[in-house]
Image (cartoon, rainbow, N blue to C red):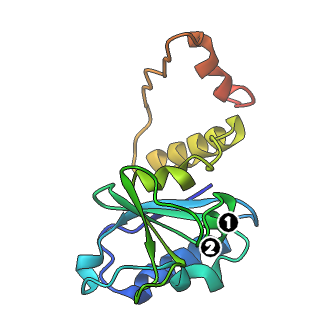
């Protein structure tokens, strides 16, 4: 899964360019995730799936707003979540619809409606976590960091040694 950083983007074209760049380095079918966008920085217009559908036909996309109360899904992500013009707003959330009394979802989901898409995003695999570890390690090395300590993760009911499985296959 590719992560797109959108914090500080202050124009629609830059928003779209960053998504397009992410698509070019992402396998077809893989999710593109990201966030941090703030529509107030580019004049207030809310983004819509139509901004990115042409460049993301084979990758579901989920991009959360900087405040965490809204997110943008492309049409593929909406389809995977079963969101159509017939889908009712969930309790505590809103599926934004086209203007003028339209019923088509725009791709924007607010508050609890976000879970309709977020629940479809697969968990990171051990391979994904290993790749992220390699990228983070290489970044740290380029900045002169030679030692990193990770206290690991612990979930009640899950053996603590499972967190070390992510490191299997590494040659230290």
Q: Residue at x 40, y 46 (%)?
A: 144
Determine which quarter of the picture holds residue 6.
bottom left
Report x, y in % for residue 27: 74, 64
Q: Is residue 84 visible?
A: yes
153 and 104: which one is in front?
A: 104
Q: Residue at x 58, y 45 (%)?
A: 132
Report x, y in % for residue 122: 65, 45
Q: CA distance from mark 1 to mark 2?
A: 6 Å
Kindly identify which residue carries mark 2. 75
Q: Residues within 10 Å of mark 1 (few under 14, many from 20)?
A: few
Report x, y in % for residue 76: 67, 69
How many numbered discs sit on the rendered protein? 2
Residue 27, labelled with which disc? none
Q: Residue at x 65, y 28 (%)?
A: 166
Rendered view: 89 above or below 120: below
Report x, y in % for residue 157: 55, 10
Kindly identify which residue carries mark 1. 79
Left or right of 74? Residue 102 is left
Left or right of 80? Residue 155 is left
Q: Residue at x 56, y 49 (%)?
A: 135
Looking at the rendered structure, the secondary structure element under dot 1 is helix
- The quadrant the N terminus occupies is bottom right
Q: Is residue 110 visible?
A: no
Q: Residues within 10 Å of mark 2 (few under 14, many from 20)?
A: many
Instruction: Determine contact: label 1, label 2, CB under 8 Å.
Output: yes
Determine which quarter of the picture holds residue 165.
top right
- The quadrant the C terminus occupies is top right
Looking at the rendered structure, the secondary structure element under dot 2 is helix
Determine which quarter of the picture holds residue 94.
bottom left
67 and 126: which one is in front?
A: 67
């Amino acid at each position: 899964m590719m992560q797109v950083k959108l914090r500080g983007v202050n124009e629609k074209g830059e928003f779209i360019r960053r998504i397009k760049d992410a698509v070019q380095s992402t396998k077809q079918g893989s999710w593109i995730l990201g966030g941090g966008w703030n529509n107030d920085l580019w004049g207030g217009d809310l983004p819509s799936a139509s901004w990115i559908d042409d460049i993301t036909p084979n990758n579901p996309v989920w991009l959360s707003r900087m405040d965490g109360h809204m997110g943008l899904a492309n049409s593929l992500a909406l389809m995977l979540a079963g969101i159509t013009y017939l889908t009712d707003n969930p309790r505590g959330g809103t599926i934004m619809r086209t203007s003028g009394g339209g019923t088509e979802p725009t791709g924007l989901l607010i508050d609890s409606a976000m879970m309709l898409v977020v629940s479809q995003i697969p968990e990171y695999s051990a391979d994904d976590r290993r790749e992220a570890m390699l990228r983070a390690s290489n970044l740290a090395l380029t900045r002169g960091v030679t030692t990193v300590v990770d206290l690991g993760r612990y979930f009640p009911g899950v053996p603590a040694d499972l967190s070390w499985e992510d490191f299997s296959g590494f040659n230290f």
